[in-house]
Amino acid sequence: MKHQGDLKLKLLSGSANQLGARFDGEGTNFAVFSAHAQQIDLCVFSADGKNELARCPLPERTGPVWHGYAPGLMPDTPYGFRAHGSYAPEQGHRFNPNKLLMDPYTRELRGAWKNHASTLGYDSASSGLDLSFDPRDSAPYVAKSVVSDPALFSHVEPRGDCDWADALIYEAHVKGLTQQHPDVADAVRGTYDGLASDAMLDHLQWLGITAIELLPVHAFLDEGFLLDRGLRNYWGYNTIGFFAPEPRYFGPAGLAGFRNMVRRFHAVGIEVIIDVVYNHTAEGDHRGPTLCYRGLDNASYYRLIAGRPRYYVNDTGCGNTVNVSHPYVLRMVMDSLRFWVQQMGIDGFRFDLATTLGREDHGFDPRGGFFDALRQDPVLAEVKLIAEPWDIGPGGYRLGEFPHEFSEWNDGYRDAIRRYWRGDPHSAQDLSARLLGSAGEFDKQGRRAWSSVNLLTAHDGFTLADVTRYDHRHNEANGEGGADGHHANYSDNCGVEGETDDSDILRRRARRQRNMMATLFLSQGTPMLLAGDEVANSQSGNNNAYCQDNPIGWVDWAEPDRALLDFVASLSAFRASHRALRQTRFLHGAKRTQDGLPDVEWTDFKGAALQWKYPGLSNLCLTLRCSAEAVARHGDGDTVFIVFNRAEAEAEVTLPKTRPAQHWVRCIDTAADGHFPACEIATDRILVEGQSVVALALKDDGVGL
């Protein structure tokens, strides 16, 4: 690619007020942050992005913002920046004007990112490695920013009207959910358009889903080491652009397909939450490419090691850590969040490695700058916020320590439920805490029971089917010798590793999946389903399918477990119809004023108080009533009785006493292979099969459930 000079580009001073490229109807204003650059050039390209037509320094600098206005420069114009300054890695600066840089605020990208040595700021063949300087032009090998038409991003109101207590989240991958779905048209499989197809909307509505949580949709890159293995970054946790939707998921509607997808979800009452990665970027460590932030102002955008600024703080395990403590970097993150809410219609965010975002120089701080900015923002006050409460940095595990506006992924819940149903010693005591919303972690400073996002599985780890099929991970396809991924899965293959035709083992596995699903839906907190678990999707024992953009990572719809699907739908409907299962307050056994009964009771199978200190405890009963502390509402007389029988043998269970004109209705029974019809109980005892969960609801005579 050569500098052609075909376009006469004359820049006026422009404005520093809004960062990025902004078309005003007559021309385009460009503004970009860099505190340490000596000059920043705007480079304009031909429509296909292949020829550089003009290069001109931005004429003005206001504080750390470089800016200029190009009269007559229209939308759909590809462009990029080149930044001049010191190339001094040992001082934290890596300016190299030979590297074309993406605009951090671009909303569209054109062309492909290529794994080529010229994208490195240094000469990879030099013995000095990153201390050397590479003079090659990287423009032919990088995607170009694009001046966007404002009409593409007109204001969209988020739906945002589902209460946390009613939420049922479905975690899904844009491509993987539909790539193999027979009822999604070939032309839109694996795209934003396909995700909101009629087939998928019908499926999610059948399950009672209130929010779909998408793995990263910000523009991201495939790491060079994966491309060398013939693999790709499938999950997308390698962000390069925080404002641009990932183009690989575009369907026939292109970029507009994303907003159309959101509108279709909203039309059927489903919110859209996106997984966002503001903790690191795709530029990696000191050996990585110079694509945007590193070249614009390495010392500002990234946290560098004190006293050794050639190297990056790596609290993320991904090579670098975004410096959210810097005011302009924090501004970029906040501008990005508002953009996805106001212009793309997003209803919430799940923050990957959220501890990183809350870490100040003195460590993690729930009153740090990032949280302060979030909590005072009127736009973001209307959306759901979910934290992944850990990273690999010092003191990185922070479950239960985020501000009250957040809910948090609860890995303790995941492990407790797996260990209980696997039969681990002392796991019943841990199960009991998780069933009531993990109050030990979350019941403080006015936080609500929905703060715990309860999950059996997630994209990272075994699927639910594989939790019951494999004792060990089988990640050989990842090319890392099977050593990657979690080694502590708390899984149980029920007797045979992997596939089997043994009918008894298949029966045990199916029962185990129903038991775990029932536990999830009968727990206080916010339940989250991994896409495909409802049809027993397997990844063949791969518990780290981050690079498997193929049938290993995609949901297999060829032979869905329809009995499990119907069972999960019935669990969802049962939870939605019982307030006792969807409470905002934590339950501590306090007596209620309306009837003098405790809001929660633990009993054994004979109806006596549970002996918690018994080391062999494995079976228990739980009676749930609406909180004694909650403000009285319609339906607060709801009562649910749940039996957990982990033993192999059938057991007789004494039911809680009822008042006159009341009786119990058996609504959920995991021992049933298919649909379980609700049945009224005329006695004060029931039989519960071994290895099963039963849930009953208290009914007043003459009143429907």
Image (spheres, grey):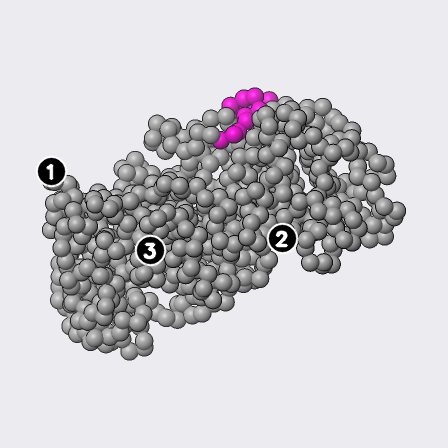
| Pointer 1 local density, CA inside 10 Å: few below 14, some 14–19, many at least 20 | few
Give me the residue at 41% from left, 51% from top: 365
Indicate which disc residue 564 carries. Answer: none
Q: Looking at the image, which is closer to me, 27 or 157? A: 157
CA gap between label 3 and label 1 equals 34 Å
| Of the pair 280 and 196, the residue shown nearer to us | 280
Q: Earlier in the sequence, mark 1 or mark 2?
A: 1
- Choose between 535 and 314: the one closer to the eye: 314
Helix, strand or loop for disc 2:
loop
Q: Does residue 99 sit above or below 624 in this rendering?
A: below
Q: CA distance from mark 1 to mark 2?
A: 61 Å
* Crowdedness near tag 3: few (<14), some (14–19) or many (≥20) residues, C-alpha within 10 Å: many
Amino acid under label 3? Ser
Image point (22%, 50%), residue name: 290
Percent across and percent down for residue 207 are: 61, 48
Asked if labels 2 and 1 touch by Cβ distance under 8 angstroms, the answer is no
Describe residue 689's horizontal placement relative to residue 171 as left or right. right
Marked residue nearer the N-terminal end (3 or 1): 1
Disc 3 designates what residue?
Answer: 325
Magenta stretch holds residue 493: yes
Q: Amino acid at mark 1?
A: Ser
Q: Which residue is mark 2?
A: 584
Q: Is residue 591 left or right of residue 259?
A: right
What's the magenta region? Answer: 489-503
Q: Which residue type carries mark 2?
A: Thr
The answer to which of marks 3 and 2 sits earlier in the sequence is 3
- The residue lying at 31 percent from left, 48 percent from top is 321
Q: Main secondary structure of the magenta part?
A: loop
Query: Label 1: which residue?
Result: 127
Look at the image and tell me whether residue 259 can be seen: no
Question: Does 95 lie within the magenta span?
Answer: no
